[in-house]
């Protein structure tokens, strides 16, 4: 499974591309201390999600939660 997030680093607006990941149920975004700042539920067959990170600058973890197999995690730097 491949997970693409761009641009990374970001100024706040980013795209999450899950086209190579099958059966995505949700996407969770947590800040550096582990607090969830956003959660998106896949409501369609969309392969790309545009997301705005509204929090302060820092490192965020994007977790893609599939309906089969382990979750995928990727770190994003917000400048």
Image: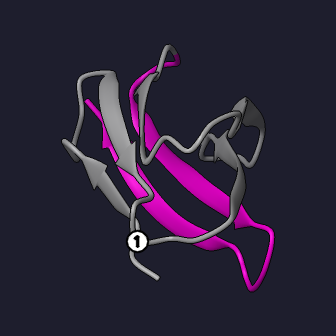
Query: Where the C terminus falls, by quadrant?
Result: top left
| Furthest-front residue in this view | 45
Instruction: Categorize mark 1 by other alpha carbons within 10 Å: few (<14), some (14-19), many (20+).
Output: few
Residue 29 image point, x, y percent: 63, 42
Q: Is residue 13 left or right of residue 33?
A: left
Residue 16, position as x, y percentages in the image: 40, 45
Indicate whether 63 appears above or below 21. Answer: above
- Please determine whether, in this image, residue 3 is positioned above or below residue 31: below
Image quadrant assignment for residue 41: top right
What secondary structure is marked by label 1? loop
Residue drawn at x 24%, y 33% as measured from the top left: 10
At 68% across and 66% down in the image, what residue appears? 23
Front residue of 62/58: it is: 62
According to the picture, the residue beneath numbered tag 1 turns out to be 20
Side of 12 relative to 60 (left or right): left
Q: Residue furthest top?
A: 54
Horizontal arrangement in the rendering, residue 76 relative to residue 67 (left or right) = left
Q: Is residue 18 magenta?
A: no
Extent of the magenta region = 55-79
In front here: 79 or 71? Answer: 71
Question: Please, what is the dominant secondary structure of the magenta stretch?
Answer: strand
> Residue shown at 22%/47% (left/top)?
8
Q: Is residue 27 above or below residue 1?
A: above
- 26 relative to 63 in the view: left or right: right
- Report if residue 68 lies within the magenta region: yes
């Amino acid at each position: 499974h491949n997970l693409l997030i761009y641009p990374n680093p970001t100024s706040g607006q980013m795209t999450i591309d899950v086209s190579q990941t099958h059966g995505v149920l949700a996407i969770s975004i947590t800040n550096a201390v582990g607090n969830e700042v956003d959660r998106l539920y896949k409501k369609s067959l969309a392969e790309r999600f545009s997301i705005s990170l509204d929090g302060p600058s820092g490192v965020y973890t994007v977790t893609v939660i599939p309906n089969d197999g382990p979750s995928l995690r990727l770190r994003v730097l917000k400048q």
